[in-house]
Every structure is written in structure tokens, then in C-alpha cells.
């Protein structure tokens, strides 16, 4: 018959340690993150802040707490260009940018007219896995030491004016329109208005409201959010939804930091990025509908919704092939030698355009 022996002091202490380990572990402080990054926004983006913060939480979750990101909104870490250079040198890991060509030479591809004309097309063209505009913009950012994480969009551009509704290029007759230094859009308007007597005036975006109110110009390109938030609807009478250009900004990371990240953590960030981009697009599309409803309720503001055929008339008049050869081909040939990338990009974008039109027609 066996007799139970009493526990010695050593055994008792060991048992207490084991009990403390199992029952006290949940209360121990979490292991410190292996990567602590900064994410900087150069401008106030109140409609987006919650989504960028959600991205940060998702990265922390999917990385098992190995990556922590501190969020700096509203230009806290500097101007757009200052933050850009900070991400370039790695002192700030992640930034939110518009790829102006003085900073990102290949950024011209982000702003080319008629590349994207709907939210559905934007999702396909900027898809992380096989989107043609994602591919070339990733190459553009790689050239300046960065890698893309996700896209942020406020949607399409149309044309507003105080003279008449615009339903065809002929309606541009004798209009004086405000433009910026966005050369692709300027070239497009020049082609669309050829022979109509239309003229273009370069006016800073911040001066546009007064210029329209005082009749310095008859009209301008604008967006649904700008018509409400920047009050362009107060100084415009007519607006046509041409959808000839698409607003797209980019959230990017320092390339050396990204390349040094273990594959499983790159996958974690990519997963968080894909979910965030989808959520941002859905939110912007929802806001767009709300903006349109508000504008339709304004008595003196008139919206012309173009048919696909009417929009195609403006698109054809833009003669984009020549503009691509002038503005995009030099950079594409340099970065994709011997691959005929200028034609490839345009062909892929046309496939997306035709697919969207076909699906739209089938749904009617």
C-alpha cells in the first residue's frame, strides 16, 4: 500500500510558481511591438480619419501586435512635401500623398483623363493584385523610394459653368474655363474645345470661388464633394457629370522598410490595406450619393447626367492617344524598356471600360 508523501519546501515553491504562471499570465504586460511606425497626413481628412485609424488597428491585429502605428493627422508632422521627404528618408514610415510629378515623375499616370470613370472601374484599375494602374503607380513610387499600401479616392470630376448645360463638346462654345497646371487635363480640354472658341485660364484652386462669383471665368472642373464642401455650387449654375478624371491619392511606405519586413508581416499589412481600401471606396461612394441629393435639392443648381453615348462623345474628342504619347510614353519607355507599356496600359484600361459598360447594360 502506497503512502502519499508530504510536499517539501522546494516542491511547494515550484507548485506556487506554476500556479502563478498559469493564472497570472493574462495580467502580465504584452510583449513590446517589434516595429513602431509613424503615419502622417499632410491635410485634414475628417471623412477618412476613422478608416485610417481602423487600418492601424487591423495592422496591429493581423500582425499579432508586432506592428504598432502612431497616427499624425492634419499636417502635424509638416506640409505635404515635407512629409514626402520624411517618408523618403525613413524618419516617417507611412505617408498620404498626391503624386505630383515634381515629386513622383511617374505620377502623371495617376491623373490621366478617362482612365477611370466609375467606382467599379476604380476598384479594378487599382486592384492590389492585378490592377494596371496599381502596377504602374507602384513602379512610380518605387522609383522615389516608396511602396504603395492603399488608395484613397473622392471620386470623379465633371465640368461646371454659368452659361449652359454641357451635353456635347459643341456646348463648350466661347466658354472661359479655369484650369490648373495638371497638363493632362489641360491637353484634354484643349482637344475637346478645339474649334469652339473656348479659352482656358490658370487660376489657383483657392481663388476659384471668387473668380467664379465675379465672372472672371465661366466655369471649371470640380467634384461632388467640392460642390458642397468648397461651396462651388453657390457660384455655378450648371454641372455635367463627365467623369473625365478620377481623384486618387496614395498611402505609401518607405520602400527599404517595406522590403526588410518579413513576408508574414507584409501579408498582414496587405490584408489590412485591402480591407481599408474597400471600406474607403464604399464610404466615398455613399457620400457621393448624399452630395448629389443635396445638390438636387438646390433650386438654382442644375445637374446634367450624361448618357454613356454623350460621355463617349467628349471622350472621343479628347484624342487621348496623342496626350499619352506626349506625357506618359517617355516615363513608361524608360521604366519598361522594350515592353510597349504605353499601349499595354491603354489596352487594359479600355478592357475595364468596356467591361463596366457591358455589365451596366446587362443590369438594365
Image (tube, rainbow, N blue to C red):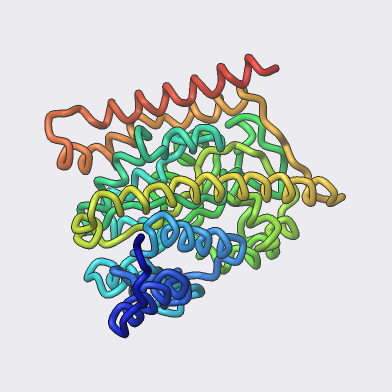
Asked if residue 348 lies left or right of residue 220, the reply is left
Q: Residue at x 70, y 58 (%)?
A: 228
- The image quadrant of residue 252 is bottom left
Q: Can you see residue 326?
A: yes
Q: Residue at x 37, y 34 (%)?
A: 131
Query: In terms of depth relative to the viewer, which is nearer, 323 or 76?
Result: 76
**Count of marks placed on residues:** 0
Asked if residue 144 lies left or right of residue 354, the reply is left
Instruction: Looking at this view, name the residue that lies furthest to the front.
Output: 1
Residue 218 x %, y %: 64, 52
Q: Can you see residue 80?
A: no
Q: Residue at x 68, y 50 (%)?
A: 287
Residue 216 x %, y %: 62, 61
Quarter the C terminus occupies: top right
Query: In terms of depth relative to the viewer, which is nearer, 136 or 295?
Result: 136
Residue 81 x %, y %: 34, 70
Asked if residue 135 lies left or right of residue 314, the reply is left
Amino acid at each position: 500500500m502506497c503512502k502519499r508523501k508530504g510536499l517539501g519546501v522546494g516542491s511547494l515553491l515550484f507548485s506556487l510558481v506554476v500556479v502563478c504562471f498559469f493564472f497570472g499570465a493574462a495580467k502580465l504586460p504584452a510583449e513590446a511591438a517589434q516595429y513602431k511606425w509613424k503615419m502622417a497626413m499632410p491635410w485634414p481628412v475628417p471623412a477618412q480619419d476613422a478608416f485610417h485609424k481602423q487600418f492601424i488597428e487591423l495592422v496591429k491585429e493581423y500582425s499579432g501586435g508586432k506592428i504598432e502605428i502612431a497616427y499624425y493627422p492634419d499636417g502635424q508632422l509638416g506640409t505635404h512635401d515635407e512629409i514626402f521627404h520624411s517618408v523618403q528618408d525613413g524618419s516617417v514610415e507611412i505617408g498620404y500623398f498626391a503624386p505630383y510629378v515634381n515629386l513622383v515623375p511617374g505620377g502623371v499616370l495617376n491623373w490621366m483623363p478617362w482612365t477611370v470613370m466609375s467606382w467599379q472601374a476604380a476598384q479594378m484599375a487599382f486592384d492590389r493584385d492585378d490592377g494596371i494602374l496599381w502596377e504602374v503607380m507602384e513602379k512610380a513610387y518605387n522609383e522615389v523610394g516608396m511602396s504603395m499600401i492603399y488608395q484613397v479616392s473622392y471620386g470623379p470630376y465633371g465640368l461646371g459653368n454659368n452659361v449652359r448645360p454641357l451635353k456635347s463638346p459643341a456646348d463648350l462654345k466661347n466658354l472661359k474655363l479655369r484650369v490648373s497646371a495638371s497638363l493632362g487635363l489641360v491637353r484634354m480640354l484643349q482637344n475637346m474645345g478645339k474649334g469652339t472658341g473656348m479659352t482656358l485660364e490658370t487660376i489657383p484652386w483657392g481663388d476659384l470661388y471668387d473668380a467664379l462669383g465675379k465672372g472672371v471665368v465661366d466655369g471649371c472642373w470640380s467634384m461632388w464633394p467640392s460642390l458642397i464642401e468648397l461651396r462651388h455650387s453657390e457660384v455655378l449654375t450648371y454641372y455635367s457629370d463627365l467623369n473625365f478624371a478620377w481623384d486618387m491619392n496614395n498611402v505609401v511606405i518607405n520602400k527599404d522598410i517595406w522590403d526588410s519586413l518579413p513576408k508574414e508581416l507584409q501579408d498582414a499589412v496587405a490584408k489590412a490595406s485591402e480591407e481599408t481600401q474597400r471600406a474607403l471606396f464604399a464610404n466615398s461612394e455613399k457620400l457621393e450619393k448624399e452630395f448629389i441629393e443635396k445638390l438636387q435639392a438646390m433650386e438654382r443648381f442644375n445637374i446634367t447626367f450624361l448618357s454613356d453615348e454623350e460621355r463617349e462623345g467628349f471622350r472621343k474628342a479628347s484624342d487621348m492617344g496623342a496626350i499619352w504619347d506626349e506625357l506618359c510614353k517617355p516615363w513608361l519607355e524608360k521604366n519598361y524598356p522594350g515592353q510597349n507599356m504605353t499601349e499595354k496600359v491603354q489596352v487594359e484600361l479600355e478592357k475595364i471600360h468596356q467591361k463596366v459598360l457591358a455589365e451596366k447594360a446587362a443590369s438594365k
